[in-house]
Amino acid sequence: MTKNIICSRCVMDTTDREISFDSEGLCSHCSEANILLPKFHFTDDEEKLNLEIWPGIIKKSRRCEYDSIIGLSGGVDSSYVAYLAWKSGLKPLCVHFDNGWNSEISVSNINKIIEITGFDFTTYVIDWPEFRDLQRSFIRAGVVDIEMLTDHAIWAAMFQIRRKSRIKFVLTGTNYTSEHGMPQTWLWRKQDLRNIKAIHAQYGERKLKSFPTMSTLQLLMVESLGIGGKILQPLNLINYRKTAAMEILKSDFGWRYYGGKHYESIFTKFYQAYILPEKFGIDKRKAHLSALIRNHEMTKDEAIAELATPQYAPRELKQEKEYVLKKLGFTEAEFDSIIKSAPVPHDFYSTDSTWVHPLMAMKKRLNRSGWCSGNKSL
C-alpha cells in the first residue's frame, strides 16, 4: 500500500490524487496560495477604501426597488455578506433557496438576520419531487459531486429572480481565503448542465419541468462580460477571516454555528461527513482546514486534532442516515450497495468539458495575472 504523504505546512495529503510536493514537502495548494493569497490581503487603508467604493457603485447603479440580491443560506459566508450590506446601507433582496434540506439552525440564522437588518426576503422553493429524483439519479450514477445539483440551481434561481426584479448586482459569499485549495478531483463544474441532464436521463424516473438551470456559457457571459447582471464578491475585497466573521455574526445577530462548512444543510452534512469518506475516501475537512492554516486562522496541530475527531457520533449517524434514506426513498440495503460500488467519473456521462476547459484555462491565466476580483483596488 502506498504511504499517504502530508504537506509540511497544511493537512492536505495524497488523498488528493493530483497533489504534488516540492523539495521541502510543500504541497501544490500551498505553493499556489503563496502566489495568490496576497492578492486578497489588504492594508487598512486599502480595505477602508474598498468598503467605501463597492457599496457606492451599487447604490449609484440602483434601477429598481433593490440595489442588489444576496443568496442567504444561514451559513457564515452568505451571512457575513448580508452583514456587510447592512453596515454599508445597501438595500438588497435576500433570497433563500429551499431544496427540502434546511436545518433548524439555518432557518434560525436567516430569521435573525432578516429581523435585525430589516431586509426584504423571499424563499425560492424548488419542486421537491423533481429535486428528489435528481439527487437519487446522482447517487445511483456513482459520481462524486452530488452537491452540484444544489449549487447549480441556486445560481440559476438567483439570476431568474434578478432578471425578473431588474436587479443588477448579485452579491455572493464566494471567497478565496477560506475556499482555496479544493482538489479538482473532489468536485465537478457546477454549471455543466449537459452532465446533469445526461445523468438524469439515464437514472431519472420523472421529467424535469421546473428545475432552474443556467449553462456554463451563460455564467461565463455574466462573469466576463456582465451580460445578465454583475457578480460581486465582497469577501474578496476585505481581509476576510472566517473565525472573526463568526464572532461578529454571533455578537450582532445571535447567529449560531452549525459544526462544519456547509453543514447548515442536512443533506450537505450527510454528503460531506458520510458519503464522501465512505464511497470516495474524501475528507473535505482537509481542504477547509488547510485554507484556514494558510490564512493564519489556526495551526496545523489544531487541524490535525480536529481531523482526528469523527465527523459523526454513532447515534447521530444512525438517526441522520435513516432520515436521509427515508426522504430520498432508498432502502438501507440499496443505499449501502451503491456506497460500496466503484465510483464513476462525471465524464463517463456526457459533458460540456471539451469546449469549456480551454475557456476556463484562459480565465485562470487572467486571474493569475491580476484580472480578478481580488485586485488591490476596484
Image (spheres, rainbow, N blue to C red):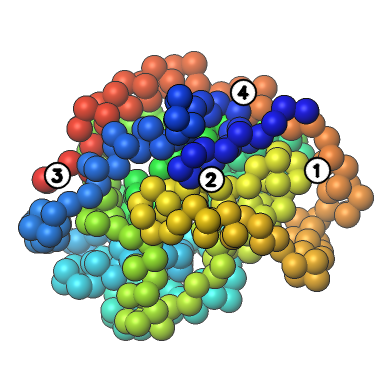
Disc on res. 11:
2
Nearer to us: label 4 or label 2: 2
Q: Residue 12: image x %, image y %?
A: 54, 41
At mark 1, the secondary structure is: helix
Disc on res. 376:
3
- Check whether the beta carbons of the residues at disc 4 and disc 1 lie within 8 A of each other: no
Amino acid type at image mark 3: Lys
- Looking at the picture, tell me which residue is in the foreground, 264 or 157: 264
- Check whether the beta carbons of the residues at disc 3 and disc 2 lie within 8 A of each other: no
- Check whether the beta carbons of the residues at disc 2 and disc 1 lie within 8 A of each other: no
Amino acid type at image mark 4: Asp
Residue at mark 1? 339
User: How dense is the environment of label 1, judged by Cα within 10 Å: few (below 14), some, or many (20 and up)?
Assistant: some
- Check whether the beta carbons of the residues at disc 3 and disc 1 lie within 8 A of each other: no
Residue extending farthest right: 333
268 displayed left or right of 246: right
Q: Residue 224: image x %, image y %?
A: 25, 32
Residue at mark 4? 347
